[in-house]
């Protein structure tokens, strides 16, 4: 069973001058956002979203890789 839930995946054609994929998900009752470069799924930024603000997120490489794999499956459909 997963310990996270993806709530949104948004593909943006013009963010940072290239295509990007932003994924919003919950983990341990906290909401996070990771933006990947669509072409190679490298991280552009990652945020923890709390109290109507966003702060840089500290996420494990394992969790990031799980999210990256789900994003890859979603955009390759």
Image (cartoon, rainbow, N blue to C red):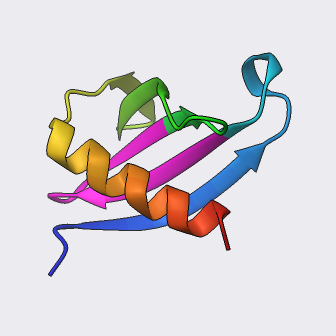
Q: Residue at x 36, y 44 (%)?
A: 32
Residue 27 percent across, percent down from the top left: 22, 57
- Find residue 9 and report its image quarter: bottom right
Q: Is residue 22 left or right of residue 59?
A: right
Q: Nearer the viewer, residue 77 or 49?
A: 77
Q: 46 above or below 65?
A: above
**Residue lying furthest bottom:** 1
Q: 52 above or below 63?
A: above
Q: Residue at x 40, y 29 (%)?
A: 46
Residue 45 percent across, percent down from the top left: 47, 23
Q: Nearer the viewer, residue 37 or 59?
A: 37
- Find residue 61 and report its image quarter: top left
Residue 34 percent across, percent down from the top left: 45, 38
Residue 69 percent across, percent down from the top left: 40, 58
Please check the rendered image and state whether residue 4 is part of the magenta-colored stretch, yes or no.
Answer: no
Which contiguous range is marked in magenta?
21-34
Q: 17 above or below 13?
A: above
Q: Is residue 48 left or right of residue 63?
A: right
């Amino acid at each position: 069973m997963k310990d996270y839930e993806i709530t949104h995946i948004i593909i943006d054609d013009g963010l940072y001058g290239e295509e990007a994929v932003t994924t919003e998900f919950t983990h341990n009752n906290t909401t996070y956002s990771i933006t990947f470069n669509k072409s190679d799924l490298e991280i552009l930024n990652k945020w923890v979203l709390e109290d109507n603000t966003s702060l840089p997120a500290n996420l494990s490489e394992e969790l990031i890789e799980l999210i990256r794999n789900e994003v890859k499956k979603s955009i390759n459909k």
